[in-house]
Amino acid sequence: MGNMSKLLNRSLKKFIIYAGLVLVCSIPVYYAIISWLWDYELNEHNIVLTAEADREDSFRIIIAVTVLTVLFSTLLLGGFILLNRRISGRLWQPFYQSLSKIKNFDLSRPGEITFKETDIDEFRELNQSLYKLIAGNVAIFNQQKEFADNASHELQTPLAVIQSQLDLLLQSKSLSGEQYVIIEDAHKALARVSRINKNLLLLTKIENSQFMDKEMIDLSGLLEKTISIFINFSEAKQLEIKMGAMPGVIVEGNKILVEILLNNLITNAIRHSPPNSTISITLSGNSLVVKNTGSAALQQDQLFKRFGTTSSKTPGTGLGLALVKQICNRYNWKIAYTFNNYQHTFSLDLNLDFLPNRVVTMQDNNPV
Amino acid sequence: MKILVIEDETTLAQSIGTYLSDENYLCEFAGTFEEAIYKVEAYDYDCILLDLMLPGGDGIKILEELKAQNKQEGVIIISAKNSLEDKIKGLQIGADDYLTKPFHLSELAARIYSVIRRKQFGNVNVIEQNELKINLLGKTVMVNDQPVSLTKKEFDLLLYFISNKNKVVSKGALAEHLSGEVADMFDSYDFIYVHIKNLKKKLHEAGCDNYLKTLYGTGYKWEI
């Protein structure tokens, strides 16, 4: 990236170097020609100069030629630079406009992209090719979205059939203990499939820009509520949840999404903690940090990808953190993972630099 | 009790019918929109299970039709769509409950039971079973006319068992019932043991017969 330079500067630099070279080379040529003419003129009129005068003349000629060359070359090059900048700036304008349009274009955000009309053939062609390329991509993207949506919906019904059949089988009078265990295992796998399906559907919906409505959410309160829901599960594993939440942290977002985000972070911590360990959850002014004990660091680059961390050993769907990431992206929050001292740490940066004012105004508006 | 199952997936409709038939419920089926509209207009039911995506039309229209005719049936939507908007819309139009596919049949039975009790027993909503008396509105339980103090979770469990009496209920179904959506994020449902143990103990100490049987190690059955 360090060697990158703008297209226009690049061509200009070559021009200038070339022009400079030609002008520098021209100095001796000028000198030789003028000296020759001078000598010729002197001979013609039979003027004989002393050696000293002759040297003096040569010296003057050199100075005059150099000064003139430098003067004109400065004028010439300066003019080049200015003209080039103005002309090509205007010339390449449509290109830069298209470029900035493409930069701001996001496949997942619906909205037409239009390039400015241009009377330059090459750019018109470029824009037309871009239109084609983008239209193709949008179509594929929509197809994919629709497919994921439909596929998930269509899957729900057969899953419901299997589930109900298993429930019926459970009622069979002649069922043995062994068979019961088989049904339970099938039930578990089924629950996992429906969970994956549900989460896929959710991801698709978030990408589809659903859940757009926003409200002010009392994150501190929501966090406490979420933890109380999971207390059953953490107690069953003898986990201690240490919670330090600054009261009155308000964020703006969709309540369902923020709930999913908290649920997923906390479930992960509970699920992956060894029994009898401690989970620490800290909510400060502008960040939420969830820490739990673990034996080895997780793979950073796979962590937030769909199915990046799926393994048969955990009941997870492999989609929880992908969802977290997706939700963070929506609200420009940052989620980061570090592993230190046998502690998995997930920190959520809420991007709330102007928080203190906001808390005060919220409290002013809502006296409790 | 008559129940109409409006569902185009016949296997699912039939398993619902089989599961419910032992519980004094008589199930009728409708697999298409037209059939459903016809049955809803012609007969009266105690409860209607309504799938929203039907061949021939949108299930929501059936619900609107019911409300337009001022029918009093309890309606439980069973839908493959797990979208909040659909849920809110359904409940606003007048559905009594909304269950997302896939669901446990025992969960469905519990919802049906609760809807029918609410609709038909109104103010005197008390379940009596031998020495056991459960007041659904006051959420109180009496054994031999002596009050038994149960936690909310224990009360919920008791009701779940009563509405699935003589049925084997799995631990997973119970966990899902108690913790809702979050239950399925975990593999271990050990916390269920504690609640069931306490419920059994409290009922036993109050002099209630042991109706709640443990089967195959992790299944339960309310036997009567």
Image: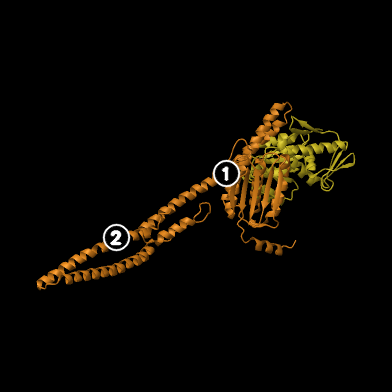
What secondary structure is found at the residue carrying circle 1?
A: helix
Q: What's the mark number on residue A156?
A: none
User: Residue sitting at 78 percent across and 35 percent down?
Assistant: B165
Q: Nearer the viewer, mark 1 or mark 2?
A: 2
Q: Check the image and report above or below for A315 versus A360.
A: above
Q: The yellow chain is which one?
A: B
Chain of the residue under the numbered disc 1 shown in the image: A
Kindly indicate the quadrant of the structure image that contains residue B188.
Answer: top right
Q: Where is residue A168 in the image (x, y as percent from the top left)?
A: 70, 32
Label 2 near label 1: C-beta < 8 Å? no
Relative to residue A309, is residue A188 drawn left or right? Answer: right
Kindly indicate the quadrant of the structure image that contains residue B150.
Answer: top right
Q: In this figure, which residue is indicated by the disc labeled 2?
A: A18
Q: In this figure, which residue is indicated by the disc labeled 1?
A: A303
Chain of the residue under the numbered disc 2 shown in the image: A
Q: Which chain is orange?
A: A
Label 2 Cα neighbours within 10 Å, binned few <14 / some 14-19 / many ≥20 = few
